[in-house]
Amino acid sequence: MRATDEGGADLVQLLTPEGERVQHPDFDIDITAEELRGLYRDMVLVRRVDREANALQRKGQLGIWVPLLGQEAAQIGAGRAMRPEDMAFPSYREHGIAWTRGVKPTDLLGIFRGTDNGTWDPVATRFHPYTIVIGNQVLNATGYAMGQKFDGKVGDADGEATVCFFGDGATSQGDVHEGFVWAAVYDAPLVFFCQNNQWAISEPTERQSRLPLYQRARGYGFPGIRVDGNDVLATLAVTRWALEECRQGNGPILIEAFTYRMDAHTTSDDPSRYRLSDELELWKLKDPIERVKVHLVKQQWADQAFFESIEAEAEQIAIELRDYCVNLPDPPPGRIFSEVYAEGNPVLEAQRDEFLAYHAGFAGGEH
């Protein structure tokens, strides 16, 4: 196993898979014991939420779930690098980013149960609703970041910035490249954060690009950098740097977080049909949570009581998530019509009335 150089010579890494702290000539971070324990807690709790939601789908309580298993460090590191005034645009796997923006895990469930489109306030949380269309959020984020630039919210240390999250598969979509072009032309304060988890559903990265993904930024005229996405410290340091550059007016920047999806693409996917178990076992040795745990123990920054307390907290969150999910009320039948347009129109209202009349014709009006 190439423990310290996986991902190439340009990979930024501060914490090895063996839990050893290493130096980097351009990126470093001062981290206290309390801060590192906080990052560990974030990752453990987010993983427990993810595993419980995955199990809920298998039990028929969710229509689908999109696992983040293995990508906790990439998301927690990037999310904790953001300031409250920064804006995040996710795809559909950013449960860890949601956690760092103050979105409750229970707020995510309605999307995957089909009862709502997400119940959080994107203005208050600075966390945009999930985007299902691959790569579409890149255009939305680019427009938002251009607005930050036009509104004069860029140019000093107090400025704002935006982070857009997408996967390696999305880089093959035209929306992503259009976003790159517009962001570059307008110097938008936008961090493009690509979580390269090695597989775009069933297609490996090498089937999509001749170059490492971070090097694509060069063709658009802005910097690209590759970070160990299983290293929460390196991800935190690199994302902080990129956000600061954007606030100062030196954006955009592309970050490729080199990580691995240890579960299926979604619960409707069977990864055993296209990848070898040996590959998964290799990446398990680079688990983002275990390396932090080992480092905490080596530094004597945490004891067994601390780890047990985090596990107990994780189990309590799982219980609350499960109870919330199974008791989610079904939306009324007219909801499908009320959430289409901001204002009604005669055609839609006629369709609604016809459907509700048909629905009421069944016994009890419940089917």
Image (cartoon, rainbow, N blue to C red):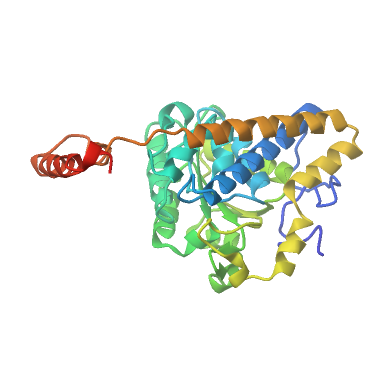
Q: Nearer the viewer, residue 160 or 234?
A: 234
Q: Quadrant of residue 226?
A: bottom right
Q: Quadrant of residue 168?
A: bottom right
**Res. 346 in view:** yes
Q: Is residue 216 left or right of residue 151?
A: right
The relative height of residue 265 versus residue 230 in the rendered view (above or below) is: below
The relative height of residue 87 versus residue 227 in the rendered view (above or below) is: above
Q: Is residue 313 left or right of residue 209?
A: right
Please state the horizontal and vertical placement of residue 323, each as a whole percent of the image.
Answer: 54, 32
Please state the horizontal and vertical placement of residue 61, each as a whole percent of the image.
Answer: 49, 44
Residue found 60% across the figure and 65% down from its top = 271
Residue found 10% across the figure and 44% down from its top = 347
Quarter holding the C terminus is top left
**Res. 242 in view:** no
Quarter holding the N terminus is bottom right
Residue found 48% across the figure and 59% down from its top = 170
Please state the horizontal and vertical placement of residue 76, each as a whole percent of the image.
Answer: 64, 40
Q: Is residue 330 left or right of residue 87?
A: left
Q: Nearer the viewer, residue 40 or 346?
A: 346
Q: Nearer the viewer, residue 185 or 308?
A: 308
Numbered disc total: 0
Please state the horizontal and vertical placement of residue 3, each as a whole percent of the image.
Answer: 81, 59
Residue found 58% across the figure and 59% down from its top = 264
